[in-house]
Image: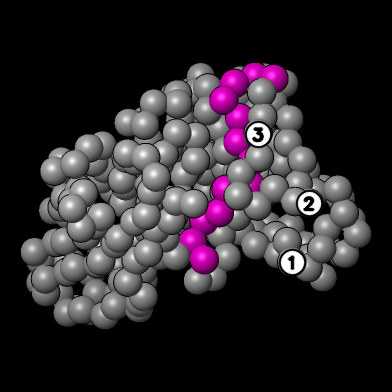
Amino acid sequence: NAGVTQTPKFQVLKTGQSMTLQCAQDMNHEYMSWYRQDPGMGLRLIHYSVGAGITDQGEVPNGYNVSRSTTEDFPLRLLSAAPSQTSVYFCASSPGLDLQETQYFGPGTRLLVL
Amino acid sequence: GDSVTQMEGPVTLSEEAFLTINCTYTATGYPSLFWYVQYPGEGLQLLLKATKADDKGSNKGFEATYRKETTSFHLEKGSVQVSDSAVYFCALKDNNDMRFGAGTRLTVKP
């Protein structure tokens, strides 16, 4: 199994540009999520999905869209990038919603918005 | 809302020293508690977890006990190694919501 994969590893955008961060998992996990990691703030949940066709907002959803058309893929879209979205983005998945289930993280995408 | 507070770093120790990283939490329900570790350039990896009060999670010589009375989940290791140098995150999961602490950077010198 490849686990959780993310592309690209690094991206530079200009303010106002759009892009999609890709996330895929091959473990047949129902739950997937996106986090951003900023210095001194740990990880903050952006959006999550409990299964194909179902998404919901996390702690910091503004400026981001998600969709979940398949169990495997959970892309994160930035419609109009802002410098405040400069961050490292992590995708994660877990088998289900049970509190005992642990999450598996991808290697991250480093995004710089100029 | 739910939150996690962990001790600020960075923490610098000599090899074989004792490690404690403090973590306290605030939650309305009965969360599961986790410690994750992040090595340079990598994503987070689960280090250990505890799902109910008085549970002790352990892995690779690290331990943490879920203390409901003090709302704490402190990470300990009796003898650290250079290879333990990383950033450690305390986290809680309550229903669909997962909250992380800010992270504590540990550097172990030979």
| Mark 1, residue position | A84
B84 lies above or below B109: above
Please say whether residue A50 is one of the residues in the magenta stretch: yes
Residue B83: which numbered mark, if any?
none
For the point 61% across and 59% down, which residue is it?
A88
Please give the chain letter of the residue carrying mark 1: A
> What is the chain identity of the residue bearing mark 2?
A
Magenta span dominant secondary structure = strand
Q: Earlier in the sequence, mark 3 or mark 2?
A: 3
Q: Nearer the viewer, residue A29 or A54?
A: A54
Residue range in magenta is: A41-53
Q: Position of residue B19 (x, y in %)?
A: 17, 69
CA neighbours of label 3 inside 10 A, class few (<14), some (14 to 19), many (20+): some
Q: Earlier in the sequence, mark 2 or mark 1?
A: 2
- In percent of the image, x 78 and y 51: which residue is there? A63
Asked if one can make out residue B92 in the rendered structure from this viewpoint, the answer is: yes
Res. A63 mark: 2
Sooner in the amino-acid sequence: mark 1 or mark 3:
3
Task: Specify whether B73 is left or right of B97.
Answer: left
Q: Chain ID for label 3?
A: A
Do the residues at pointers 3 and 2 share their chain?
yes
**Amino acid tagged 2:** Gly
Residue B43 belongs to magenta span: no
The kind of residue tagged 1 is: Ser
| Circle 3/circle 2 CB separation < 8 Å | no
Query: What is the x, y in percent for residue B110?
Result: 19, 78
Please determine if labels 1 and 3 lie on a single subunit. Answer: yes
Most foreground residue, A1 or A99: A99
Tag shown at residue A56: 3
Image depth: mark 1 or mark 3 in front? 3
SS at mark 1? helix
Instruction: Give the CA distance from mark 3 to mark 2.
Output: 14 Å
